[in-house]
Image (spheres, helix red, strand yellow):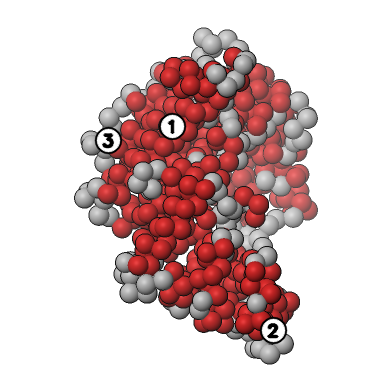
């Protein structure tokens, strides 16, 4: 008993030591209390409060060190015992220990994968995902995600035999709805690792399980969980290469426009839509084996000789038609009397902005009849709803091309005319009467509204009519050229980028030769030359850098 007390005291001190333990202290601890001693103590049940948790925490810290991780391969049989233990804490420890083993190895090292496979650990991890509590299931999921980094593990995680019990499709088929969501979550985690793993996920037909789960249940909680997974999926850089776009767009469209769909599902579906359609290559990816509308195919046959050209164009036309339907669904939700929730309205506006951040998306958002972008423009200059105005200004900046390369900011003629008309109509219906008055009003509001306004003007000034409106108000030039206007770093840079964009547009216009605009040109040039943070006249301005902005 005395030895157990000594172990507990030493483990408690080691587990709660502030900061990281160095390799020397780890070795000294294990020389005093070898791993077999600690493992044996875990199997006992001494009457010491917090004994198991303390030893588990101690072992977690031990195995996270280089020296501790190097000892794991010697104790694989003990790990097996831990994985089969009744205690959830011990199971979680065993999973994390396997994780430490994998993370300590290079992905080209096959020995760690062989240890996991030869000791039958992978099936146990899968079992934890569907039969354990959330903490153990999450630990098992993270361990499998780490295992998937190894090329040699691909055949283990994605078996070629479709009847293999460890195939994730079969695992999802034989578990409860809650456990199935965990399996789907694992699939999303695997998908996010790399293009190679994402390709395996796609080839195994695992992405189809998300859509099947959505269509096969009426459980609101399950639907929200799957929508959350879709949201995470869209965050992955290579998602547009592998996710079946048209079927997902059609699914989102049905959720947003559905009369029986709850507000939270609609809100999430709109957020996913924005992420999905914010990628330029969404319109370039041609899905395999996707049926196309016959009339579309017939309409382009005359212009394209080869069947491949016809198939590609008609499929892309089909994708565009699906996107138009989705935009119309969001437009309709903003028109609905049920859409009175501010968060939902902001989400819808933000989604339209993300869709409009691509060249093709901006064309569609501005060219639908009536243009869905009208909601964005109307809210961008409405001072009565601060949150919605902020979201709308950022959305308008995206649609106008602030996030696109300068050469792609201008979209097609019909969309450009629609954008101009929307802004002039908004001005005519306001007390400001002109776009220049609206722009000045935005720049006279709070710092976060001004920041969004700078982004909007940076994009809009590429249009000659906008440059005319900006130059019509000297106060606008005074604000964007004044280095003391902003104090936060991100706002300073946004103001400077706006000033630089105006200056570039000015130099490319006829105003550069107008003697009446000489002073304005000099002012812009001096402000651009001075940089974003300070000027010779105003040395007092200093950027206030928040912790996250410095990196």
Q: Which of the two discs, 1 and 3, sits closer to the camera?
A: 1
* Residue in the foreground of this view, choosing between 499 and 154: 499
Residue 94 in the image: state x and y as whole percent: 58, 35
* Residue 249: quadrant of the picture: top left
> Which secondary structure lies at badge 1?
helix
Question: What is the distance, in whole Å, between disc 2 and disc 1 at their CAs?
Answer: 51 Å
Q: Which mark is residue 535?
A: 2
> Which secondary structure lies at badge 3?
loop
Question: What is the distance, in whole Å, between disc 2 and disc 3 at their CAs?
Answer: 55 Å
Quarter occupied by the C terminus: bottom right
Residue 134 in the image: state x and y as whole percent: 43, 38
Q: Is residue 145 above or below residue 499?
A: above
At 66% across and 39% down in the image, what residue appears?
100
Residue bearing the label numbered 3? 258
At 35% across and 67% down in the image, what residue appears?
428
Label 2 Cα crowd, 10 Å radius (few <14 / some 14-19 / many 20+): some
Residue bearing the label numbered 1? 321
Among the two numbered marks 2 and 1 on one chain, the one whose residue lies closer to the N terminus: 1
Label 1 Cα crowd, 10 Å radius (few <14 / some 14-19 / many 20+): some
* Residue in the foreground of this view, choosing between 476 and 170: 476
Q: Is residue 492 left or right of residue 324?
A: right
Q: Are marks 2 and 3 in contact (CB under 8 Å)?
A: no
Q: Is residue 76 above or below residue 169?
A: below
At 55% across and 25% down in the image, what residue appears?
313
Q: Is residue 21 left or right of residue 145?
A: right
């Amino acid at each position: 008993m005395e030895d157990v007390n000594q172990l507990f005291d030493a483990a408690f001190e080691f587990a709660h030591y502030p900061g990281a333990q160095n390799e020397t202290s780890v070795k000294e601890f294990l020389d005093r209390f070898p791993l077999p001693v600690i493992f044996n103590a875990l199997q006992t049940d001494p009457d010491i409060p917090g004994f198991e948790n303390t030893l588990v925490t101690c072992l977690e810290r031990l195995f996270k060190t280089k020296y501790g991780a190097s000892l794991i391969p010697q104790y694989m049989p003990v790990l097996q015992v831990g994985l089969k233990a009744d205690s959830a804490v011990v199971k979680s420890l065993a999973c994390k220990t396997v994780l430490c083993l994998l993370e300590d190895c290079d992905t080209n090292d096959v020995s760690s994968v062989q240890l996991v496979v030869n000791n039958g650990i992978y099936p146990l991890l899968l079992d934890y995902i569907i039969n354990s509590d959330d903490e153990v299931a999450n630990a098992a999921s993270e361990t499998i995600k780490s295992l998937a980094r190894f090329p040699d593990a691909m055949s283990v995680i994605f078996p070629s035999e479709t009847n293999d019990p460890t195939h994730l499709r079969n695992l999802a088929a034989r578990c409860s709805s809650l456990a199935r969501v965990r399996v789907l979550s694992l699939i999303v985690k695997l998908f996010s690792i790399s293009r190679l793993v994402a390709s395996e996920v796609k080839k195994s037909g695992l992405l189809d399980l998300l859509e099947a789960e959505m269509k096969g249940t009426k459980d609101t909680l399950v639907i929200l969980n799957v929508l959350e997974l879709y949201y995470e999926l869209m965050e992955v850089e290579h998602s547009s290469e592998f996710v079946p776009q048209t079927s997902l767009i059609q699914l989102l469209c049905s959720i947003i426009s559905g009369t029986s769909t709850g507000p939270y599902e609609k809100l999430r579906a709109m957020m996913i839509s924005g992420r999905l359609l914010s990628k330029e290559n969404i319109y370039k990816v041609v899905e395999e084996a996707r049926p196309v509308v016959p009339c579309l195919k017939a309409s382009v046959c005359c212009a394209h000789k080869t069947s491949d050209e016809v198939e590609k164009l008609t499929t892309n036309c089909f994708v565009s038609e699906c996107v138009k339907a989705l935009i119309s669904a969001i437009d309709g939700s903003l028109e609905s009397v049920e859409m009175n929730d501010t968060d939902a309205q902001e989400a819808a506006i933000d989604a339209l902005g993300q869709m409009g951040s691509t060249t093709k998306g901006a064309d569609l958002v501005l060219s639908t009849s009536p243009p869905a972008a009208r909601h964005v423009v109307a809210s961008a200059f409405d001072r009565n709803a601060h949150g919605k105005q902020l979201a709308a200004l950022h959305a308008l900046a995206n649609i106008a091309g602030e996030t696109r390369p300068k050469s792609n900011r201008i979209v097609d003629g019909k969309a450009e005319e629609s954008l101009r008309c929307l802004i002039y109509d908004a001005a005519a219906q306001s007390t400001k009467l002109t776009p220049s008055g609206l722009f000045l009003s935005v720049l006279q509001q709070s710092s976060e509204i001004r920041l969004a306004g700078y982004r909007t003007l940076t994009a809009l000034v590429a249009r000659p009519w906008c440059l005319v409106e900006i130059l019509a108000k000297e106060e606008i030039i005074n604000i964007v050229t004044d280095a003391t206007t902003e104090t936060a770093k991100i706002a300073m840079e946004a103001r400077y980028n706006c000033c630089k964009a105006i200056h570039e547009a000015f130099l490319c216009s006829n105003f550069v030769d107008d003697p009446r605009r000489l002073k304005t040109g000099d002012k812009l040039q001096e402000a651009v030359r001075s940089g974003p943070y300070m000027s010779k006249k105003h040395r007092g301005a200093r950027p206030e850098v928040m912790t996250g902005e410095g990196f």
